[in-house]
């Protein structure tokens, strides 16, 4: 790499990048088209489908009436449809089924009473786990600084320098694993400014 | 005539008796192998451990003899064997013998014993030279697992048990199992669940041998963990595919208890195959890895328990029996035993290195692990909560799909985000500049994606955020590939050669990237079809037409055929998309009056962009029929991810030549601690 390098490279890369972004946009566009269907489904039908997915088929545990192939589910689906067309609200329709088949007919546990617990535990556990994780990481890190053979005691590198050094080390190790064709001089790599050069500024 | 009959039954008798004897012998041999291995290992007597090892090697042979007995009994319709009488009939096609073998409790135990014994032999063979001491303990632990399955069969659920009275015909097989999808998915799923005991035994073996803190067993454990992970993943994917094409509701995953029970160990294993890399590379997370593999094996045993007539009802459970509680007991035993070993050997698990920074690849691995475990525990919590609620408040609560979608969805998305960011961060410590540099392109791609999607009229924020995240991950991976290929190309390789060399230079890393891409394909399909699937339930008579999206379809006719045990109906649809004619589609439905079970097969026209899906829900006497018609966007990508995923795992698994010690030119003015 000589001094002409950057200019020539710049032109090439700019073109390539433009093409790259263009490709990304086109790909995303195609995928978007797949999702952005002109859905001509009426609001009532959408509501019926949503409701069907929240009501369990009483004789085939775990399955919603939407997915169940059972005769009873088919009847329940038509009841849902009827009631939606009669103008009853989601809550009223769910209550209708709860009255007949008890609370267990709803696939979504209610957010009150004892079953509030099912909703509360996951977020609580999540917060606890993250707090524990951060504490654990801090402990792991603090003990590193107390460690006698810590690198910082013998090498005076700034944080940024260290990170570049280790990134470089990592790249070389990654590269070397099983690969005998390692370049002879890593400092010729243009993409990463040489550590040695920077150090010599000091 | 009569003589012939007697000869016949004698011949059968011989095969079955041989199977019986082999079963008992396999239990005895497994018992000997366990004791010899464990005692030999703890007293450090190599001759004894070798003897135990050879004992273990003979177990699969003996189990195979029993298996041959069972197969033989099925093929010859030997209804004097209880298991054969209960799981087959004269009219059952012979190929379904394979399905019938695992369809019942006793047979599935035999299948599990066979799988565990074969995998154990391979794993012990793999480990014996590298880690003789750990291999002996591992062999002992695998022997214990085998003893459980074999013991249950010998004492409680013998697949070759005879009936006092020989029935004329058997009870037949569950009609829903009579499907080609059943040849692979359930056996693979079961194999996946039990295969977790292999990496578990290796890790525990190393721990017991006091080598938990030496990282030389990690490669072997990692290989077997990935094998197990691959089996589970393919099992789950095939299950989803089977549900999509057969169960006839247009979906593929319902957070059903049995699905959950297969997902939970998968989540823990996914965490393990990642965090074991940190131990391999950095000598850290040693305790954590032990915890993870213990959690994984516990969840796998829990899965077997739930599968086997556990307390949670499910449509998928089969091989129902009270045997489930034995599995629970065995789970408790395993958990207690391994926890004790863990505490006993805790001192040997101190990290070699310390954590340098909160922003590093290590900490990303840990965060990812924790999130995976949270998803697993949320799933467990939702799955078992109905039991608690029934016990505590007498009100049966159902925890179904809406709960899991709402709670697990965001965590899974966060995991995808980490999958994009984590691999781009350096080990040890990342400065702000490194992070910005690494995320420049991926983050821009995410923003471009978000903008394009909003501009295209997508209106569901969670889906848009999800797609943007997927773009981030893909860009990160592709950018790494392009950069690596370029730098090799500059050194004289042609682009394809450069790419192949790049991949093969660090197979665990680049194999992992391939798997990550496959996961993104899966996630794209799952997200698109959960948020943007369009569905319509229609009542139609022959001759009626309807439309959905761009598709218009005409119900031509239905043809019904009666069979001895079922009524099959095939409807015919003429389908157009816009102006182009797509051909005839034939949704299929079979009804089994005896079992009161209906089986459907949707007619699916699958393209890269979307699936057009017709399923017959009902046929009435008077010619009316109910059809469900769906457009499921991008589902094709979910099934296409399977082969790519397998490829990625294989790449990551191919053994790498041990690298020569790295020679690194450190600039002269940098002193290191060891210099």
Image (cartoon, rainbow, N blue to C red):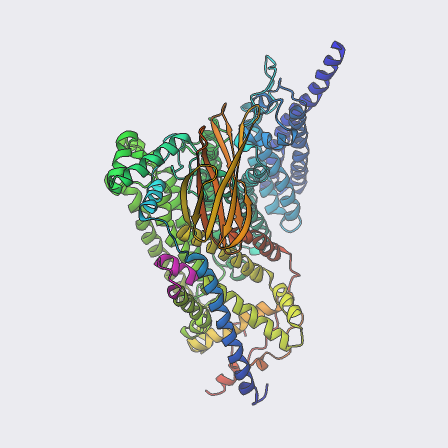
Identify the image quadrant of the C terminus of chain B. bottom right
Instruction: Return the x and y of residue B389 as percentages of the image width and height.
Output: 30, 35
Asked if the magenta segment contains residue B462, the reply would be yes
Give the side of residue B258 with respect to residue B181, left or right.
left
What is the quadrant of residue B51 in the picture? top right
The part of the image, by quadrant, that contains residue B511 is bottom right
Image height of B508 relative to B589, above or below: below
Residue B333 on image: x %, y %: 47, 35
Q: Residue at x 52, y 37 (%)?
A: B557
Residue at x 61%, y 29% (from the top left corner)? B27
Q: Nearer the viewer, residue B540 or A117?
A: B540
| Residue with the most extreme front position | B543
Up-down relation of residue A89 to residue B430 (above or below) = above
Horizontal and vertical percent position of residue B17 = 67, 21
Classified by dominant secondary structure, the portion drawn in magenta counts as helix
Please tell me which residue lies in front, B466 or A156.
B466
Would you identify the image quadrant in which residue B143 lies?
Answer: top right
Of residues B376 and B258, the one drawn nearer to the viewer in this rendering: B258
Q: Residue furthest top?
A: B2
Q: Please indicate whether residue B198 sits to the left or right of residue A108 in the image.
A: right
The percent position of residue A129, horizontal first and vertical second, equals: 35, 53
Question: In the image, what residue occupies the spot 49% across and 24% down?
Answer: B593
**B381 lies left or right of B53:** left
Q: Between residue B311 and residue B181, name the one nearer to us.
A: B181
Q: Is residue B159 visible?
A: yes
Q: Which quadrant is home to the N terminus of chain B?
A: top right
Above-or-below relation of B24 to B200 = above
Q: Which residues are magenta?
A: B454-469
The relative height of residue A177 versus residue B30 in the rendered view (above or below) is: below
């Amino acid at each position: 790499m000589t001094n002409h390098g950057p200019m020539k490279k710049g032109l090439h890369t700019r073109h390539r990048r433009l093409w790259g972004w263009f490709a990304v946009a086109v790909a995303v566009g195609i995928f978007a088209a797949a999702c952005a269907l002109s859905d001509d489904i009426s609001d009532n039908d959408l509501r019926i489908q949503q409701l069907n997915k929240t009501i369990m088929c009483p004789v085939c545990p775990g399955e919603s009436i939407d997915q169940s192939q059972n005769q009873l589910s088919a009847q329940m689906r038509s009841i849902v449809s009827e009631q939606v067309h009669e103008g009853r609200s989601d809550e009223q329709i769910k209550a209708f089924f709860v009255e007949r088949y008890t609370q267990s007919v709803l696939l979504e546990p209610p957010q009150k009473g004892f079953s509030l617990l099912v909703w509360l535990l996951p977020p609580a556990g999540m917060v606890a786990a993250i707090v524990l994780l951060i504490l654990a990481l801090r402990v792991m890190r603090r003990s590193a600084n107390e460690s006698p053979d810590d690198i910082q005691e013998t090498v005076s590198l700034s944080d940024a320098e260290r990170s570049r050094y280790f990134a470089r080390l990592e790249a070389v190790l990654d590269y070397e694993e099983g690969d005998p064709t390692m370049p002879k001089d890593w400092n010729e790599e243009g993409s990463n400014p040489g550590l040695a050069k920077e150090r010599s500024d000091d | 005539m009569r003589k012939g009959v007697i000869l016949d039954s004698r011949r059968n008798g011989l095969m079955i008796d041989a199977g019986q004897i082999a079963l008992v012998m396999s239990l005895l041999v497994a018992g000997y192998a366990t004791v010899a291995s464990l005692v030999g290992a703890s007293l450090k007597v190599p001759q004894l451990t070798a003897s135990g090892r050879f004992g273990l090697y003979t177990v699969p042979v003996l189990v195979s003899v029993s298996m041959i007995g069972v197969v033989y009994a099925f093929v010859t319709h030997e209804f004097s064997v209880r298991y054969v009488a209960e799981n087959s009939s004269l009219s059952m096609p012979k190929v379904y013998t394979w399905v019938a073998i695992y369809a019942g409790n006793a047979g599935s135990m035999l299948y599990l014993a066979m799988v565990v014994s074969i995998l154990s032999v391979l794993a012990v063979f793999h480990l014996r030279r590298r880690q003789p001491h750990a291999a002996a303990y591992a062999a002992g632990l695998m022997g214990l697992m085998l003893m459980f399955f074999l013991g249950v069969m010998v004492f409680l659920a013998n697949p070759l048990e005879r009936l006092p009275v020989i029935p004329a015909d058997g009870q037949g097989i569950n009609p829903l199992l009579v499907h080609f999808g059943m040849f692979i998915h359930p056996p693979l799923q079961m194999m996946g669940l039990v295969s977790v005991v292999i990496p578990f035994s290796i890790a525990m073996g190393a721990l017991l041998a006091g080598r938990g803190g030496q990282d030389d067993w990690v490669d072997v454990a990692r290989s077997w963990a990935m094998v197990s992970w691959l089996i589970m993943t393919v099992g789950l994917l095939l299950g989803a595919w089977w549900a999509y094409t057969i169960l006839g509701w247009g979906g593929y995953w319902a957070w059903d208890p049995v699905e959950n029970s297969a997902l939970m160990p998968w989540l823990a294993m996914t965490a393990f195959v990642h965090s074991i890399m940190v131990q391999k590379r950095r000598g850290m997370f040693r305790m954590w890895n032990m915890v993870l593999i213990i959690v994984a094996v516990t969840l796998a045993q829990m899965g077997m328990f739930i599968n086997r007539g556990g307390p949670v009802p499910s449509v998928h459970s089969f091989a129902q029996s009270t045997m489930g509680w034995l599995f629970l007991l065995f789970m408790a035993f395993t958990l207690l035993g391994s926890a004790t070993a863990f505490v006993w050997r805790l001192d040997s698990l101190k990290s070699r290195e310390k954590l340098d920074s909160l922003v590093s690849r290590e900490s990303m691995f840990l965060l990812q692990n924790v999130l995976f475990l949270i998803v697993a525990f949320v799933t467990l919590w939702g799955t078992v909560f109905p039991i608690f609620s029934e016990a505590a408040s007498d009100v049966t609560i159902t925890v179904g799909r809406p709960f899991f979608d709402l709670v697990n969805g965001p965590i899974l998305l966060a995991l995808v985000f980490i999958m994009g960011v984590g691999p781009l961060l350096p080990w040890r410590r990342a400065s702000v500049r490194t992070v910005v540099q690494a995320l420049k392109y991926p983050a821009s791609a995410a923003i471009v994606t978000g903008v394009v999607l909003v501009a295209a009229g997508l209106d569901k924020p969670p889906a848009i955020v999800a797609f943007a995240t997927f773009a981030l991950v893909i860009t990160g991976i592709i950018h790494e590939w392009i950069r690596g290929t370029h730098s090799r190309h500059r050194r004289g390789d042609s682009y394809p050669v450069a790419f192949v060399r790049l991949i093969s230079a660090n197979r665990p890393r680049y194999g992992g990237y391939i798997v990550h891409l496959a996961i993104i394909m899966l996630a794209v399909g799952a997200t698109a079809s959960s948020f943007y699937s369009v569905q319509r339930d229609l009542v139609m008579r022959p001759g009626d037409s309807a439309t959905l999206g761009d598709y218009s379809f005409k119900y031509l006719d239905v043809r019904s055929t009666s069979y001895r045990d079922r009524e099959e109906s095939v409807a015919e649809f003429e389908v157009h998309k816009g102006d182009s004619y797509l051909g005839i589609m034939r949704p299929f439905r079979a009804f089994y009056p005896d079992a009161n079970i209906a089986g459907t097969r949707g007619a699916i026209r699958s393209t890269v962009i979307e699936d057009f899906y017709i399923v017959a829900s009902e046929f009435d006497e008077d010619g009316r029929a109910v059809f469900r018609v769906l457009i499921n966007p991008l589902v094709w990508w979910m099934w296409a991810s399977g082969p790519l995923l397998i490829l990625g795992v294989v790449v990551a698994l191919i053994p790498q030549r041990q690298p020569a010690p790295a020679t690194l030119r450190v600039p002269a003015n940098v002193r290191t601690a060891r210099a």
